[in-house]
Every structure is written in C-alpha cells, then in structure tokens.
Amino acid sequence: MSDTPNLFQPIKVGNITLQNRLVMAPLTRFRSPGHVSNALNVDYYAQRASSPGTLLISEAAFVSPAAGGYEHVPGLYTQDQIDAWKVITNAVHAKGSFLFIQLWGLGRSADPTYIKKTGYDYIAPSPIATYSTTVEYVRETSRIMGYNKRHPDSPKRLPRPTKQEPPRELTEPEILQFIADYAQAAKNAIAAGADGVEIHGTNFYLPEQFLFEGSNQRTDKWGGSIENRARFMLAIVDAVVAAVGAERTALRLSPWVNFLGKDGRTPVAQWGYLISELERRGRAGQRLAYLHLIEPRGAAGAHPLAKYNATETNDLFARLWSGVLVRAGGYTRQNALKETSEDPRLLIGLGRYFIANPDIVERWKRDLPLNEYDRSTFYTEGPEGYVDYPFYNEGTAKL
C-alpha cells in the first residue's frame, strides 16, 4: 500500500488520467479584451499547469454573442477565438496537464447596457427585473474587499448592484438556439484541443435561471414544475454529450449559493431531481466526466451579497451521484487530505489560492507555505495579480 495520500494519487476522469486530485476551479479574470484570449492568458494557464497531470478548468467562455453581456471575457464561437484557445491548450499540454473549458451564458445577469451595444437583447426565462452587475462594479467590489482585508479596523462600504429593467422573455426557438449554441461551443472547444468542457450551471447565470421559481415563471414546458424547470439544463447536457461525448462533458452546480435575486428556492427538491437525472443517464452509459459542486462554505467568499448558512450541505447531492465528484469552496490542505481519503472518487477545486500559487500542487504535496492572494487584483487588467505570483523556488513565499 502506498504512503502517498489520495490527494496526490492518480485518478481517471473521463478519458484522461490525472496525477493528483487538486483542480483549478473556473475563475473569471476579465483579461481577454475583444473576447479573444491573448499571450497573457497563455502564460497564466501555463504557469498553473506546472505540476504534470493536473486538471485546470478555464474561466468561462461565452458560447455565442447572444450569451454574452460582459466585456473582457473570452468567447468560443469564432475561428479567431478557437485559434487563441488552441495556443492555451497547447501550452497546458506541453506541461503534461489537462484543460476543460467552461461554457457560459449570462441571461439576466448580463450588463444590459453592454449586451444591447453588441446588438443583442437583454433576455431571461421570464421578464422579471433583478440586480445585475458590470465589469466595473465587479472590479470596484473586488478592490474594496481587498482593501477591507488589509484594513479590518476601518472597512469601506461595498457597493450594491443596480436593479435593472425587466429582461425580455426568451421564445422557445431562442431557447432551442441556445441549446444548439452550447453544443457548438463544445465542439469548438474540442477543436481547440481542450480535453473537455464544463457547463457553467451555477451562480445565477442563464441555465440556473431556469431552475428557480423566482426567475422562471413560464407556463410552457420550460417552467411550472421541478421537471420543467430542469429541462433547459438537462437539454444542454444532452446536446453537449451528443456533440463531444459524455467523457468530455462536465457540469458545475451551486445548490446553495444565493445572491442577485435567487428567490423561490427549493434546492433539495430541484437539485435532487436534476442530479438524479444525471445519475440515471450515467447508469445508462452516459456518465459525465465529473459533477462539480460549489460548497456552501465557499459561497460567502464568492460574492458580497452571498449568504452562508452552516446547516446547508451538499452531502445529499453527493450521495445521489456515483461518478467522479469535484467539490470546491473553502478547502484547506487539512480538510482536502481528509475528505479525499474518505471518498476515493473526490477531487478538490481551488480558486483563490490557485490564483496566488501557480505551484500549489507541489506546495501542498510538500506542505510548504503559500503566497497570500490579493483580491483587489482579481479582475484588473495586465499582469499584476495574474502572472506575477512567484513559484516557491523563485524566493521566499509572501506570508
């Protein structure tokens, strides 16, 4: 029997074999102006692929122009974008690691002003007004949160998002087009050399907006019941699986994350049904590469309006799924070692500390000190807080 902890043991995920169970969680960074990845993005991913056999999940990429609504976010619907992603996947593979590209559609969480400037409508499952954010809002909030962390005795007040005009309700042909867009974007990701795709089904973006009674009040087959509200998410999963294979498809969910007007919540019943349907498909031969759950304990650090309740848990949902499982949010080295020893199919997603420690796999393997992350630079432009965090052997870690 090996003395190496499970956290640093190989595991098969879809059709790839990882050499450790630490995963870089998807992290929006707003550093792709014009919706095309660039050389700075290549350096960022190559750095974090430095431990061979590591799985990186990319920042989310828009599946179509209609799915967008933020500037500085990469897309996956033009040849220029595909070619740019190909440079990133090549750089990751050159380090012996793997990349799943996350697929994104914003819906009513888009910046209405920006999406309209691009010639597309501000849309949602139902025409219900909600709070929305802009890139500028996200950057300012992150800057103030970084300041408050450094100055806990004199914190500044966080800005609040603005309540927007009601979005336009999607027509059924538009719903079907979005499903097709996800499938095509998945094909584009594989054409760009990605090892798979992760469908972004969390944090109140378009697929998740269909799940909530408070954002989906449709009376057709896309709303009105738990089964109907799950139809859009499951249709996207089925379309992507048909396009690139189940072994290259993954889904990220956040049953307990609650912000930006996620009201009318029935997480146990709604997500229990959704995950049970994914498990049924898996047992029928369409097992996803992995299911990815955001932990409630990680929610409060993800957004200034997120709420955390210590009684909420993903354990029920984890029991409904028998495939590979990624859990992300608030993990430390100690509890990552413990939980992966108890659950042999478990991977641990890391966000903020993967930003600050491109070599975190090696640091945790050797129990080395970590660089501290600087939240104020999470969403800025340029290399600061992006590709300038030192590897351990480059000098003394910042503490």
Image (tube, helix red, strand yellow):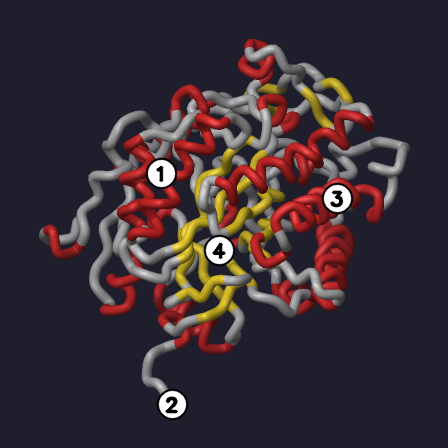
- The residue carrying mark 4 is 328
Residue ID at (39%, 44%): 89
- The amino acid on which the numbered mark 1 sits, given as a three-letter code, is Val
Could you say where residue 241 lies in the image, as x and y percent from the top left?
A: 66, 50
Write down the residue under mark 1: 87
Taking the image as shown, residue 258 lies to the left or right of residue 160, namely: right
Mark sitting on residue 1: 2
Which of label 4 and label 3 is nearer to you? 3
Q: CA distance from mark 4 to mark 3?
A: 25 Å
Q: Nearer the viewer, residue 106 or 261?
A: 106
The amino acid beneath tag 4 is Ala
Can you tell which quarter of the image residue 177 is in?
A: top right
> In what element is the residue under mark 4?
strand
For marks 4 and 1, give the one nearer the viewer: 1
Mark 3 lies on residue? 235
For image coordinates 26% across by 36% down, the residue present is 385
Cα separation, mark 3 vs mark 2, equals 43 Å
* First in sequence: mark 4 vs mark 3: 3
Q: Earlier in the sequence, mark 1 or mark 3?
A: 1
Q: CA distance from mark 1 to mark 3?
A: 30 Å
Between residue 342 and residue 70, name the one nearer to us. 70
